[in-house]
Image: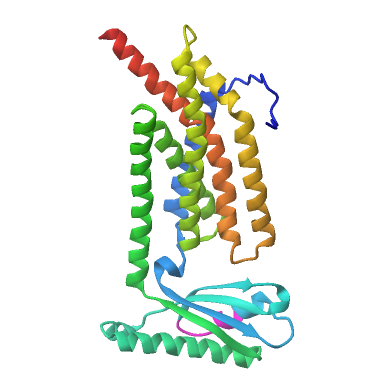
Amino acid sequence: MFEIIPHGTHLDFIGKARLCVAISLAMVAASVVAVFVVGVHLGIDFAGGTELHAKFASAPVDEGRVRDVVNGVPGLKDVSVVRFGGAEDNEFLIRFQNVADEADAAAAGSTDADERLRADRVSSVERALSGAIGGYERQSVDFVGPRVGSELRADGFKSIGLAMLLIMIYIAFRFSSRFAPGAVVAVFHDLIITAGIFVMLGYEFDLRILAAMLAILGYSLNDTIIIYDRIRENLEARTSRDLAAVLNESVNQTLSRTVLTSGTTLIAVLALAVLGGEVIRPFAVAMLIGVFVGTYSSIYIAAPTLMLLEARAARRAKAG
């Protein structure tokens, strides 16, 4: 089998665990601060709003020009414009939310009135685009109500929580109960840091990012299981070697596979981020961050957590 890391390589990963855990704690703290201070910018999938797919038949249209026109329409907020396809296609995804006024609030209990309000806002945007740019053609329009967005957001958090619970159960059955916390801590670490960096970069959270988070969760778990499997084998075969030596050996033995798997995934995701266009780029960026952080955490978070729990169990057994 091809190995990018020479056989017999012995890097002291566990010896650097304290430093790496300290760095991780700092990154998690910074991410939490970013989420609560800067705030999460929710997309229309979670906050509710309108998405208009527009096409222009005129000469190449600048994205900023479309944004300026839509921002000039009264009664809109959180306007987002991204190019759909290549520059020659002249297609854009225009997302916005309605600003509720007193008349809107009075009509909030009426579904028909709410739908008329949304249709009026879309018509206002279309008239503005036709007048300012010309050659406008509607491709599609989608509406997400605030209640639906709230339900999607709640379901998204539930899916992540359920996935983490199932991870603990799976790891506990496949290995032992002492292995499960390390895997969950590593996954939690990956999701928090990815979310924090995403907030700092100014991206909005929508269903694409939820899908990326779930993919990151699975990818991080896969890396951790590969290392855990080798750790279990080496723990069963060890005689007098201490636990740190067993963990180091296990990480080194799986290092080539880890680097190859993560490297090929990063290349594919990087291609998506660079060549995939504005629509797919947020998903690709989230995956880039998550794969990198997930590979790091499977070595420097999951393994040291296991070492801590195994050492504690050994002390209790000795004391008992």
The percent coordinates of residue 245 (x first, y second) are 53, 15
Extreme residue in the top direction: 240
Q: Nearer the viewer, residue 31 or 46?
A: 46
User: Taking 318 as reference, is 7 above or below it?
Assistant: below
In the rendered structure, which segment of residues is drawn in magenta?
A: 68-75
Farthest residue to the front: give it: 1
Determine the image quadrant of residue 117.
bottom left
Residue 178 vertical placement versus 100 (above, below):
above
* Magenta residue check for 73: yes
Q: In the rendered view, does 320 fall on the left or right side of 61? A: left
Left or right of 280: which side holds 99? left
Above or below — where is 89 with respect to 241? below
Residue 226 x %, y %? 51, 32
- Magenta residue check for 147: no
- Residue 14 visible: no
Q: Quadrant of the N terminus?
A: top right
Rendering coords of residue 193 (x, y %): 50, 44
**58 in relation to 15, above or below:** below
Q: Residue at x 62, y 80 (%)?
A: 66
Give the quadrant of the C terminus: top left
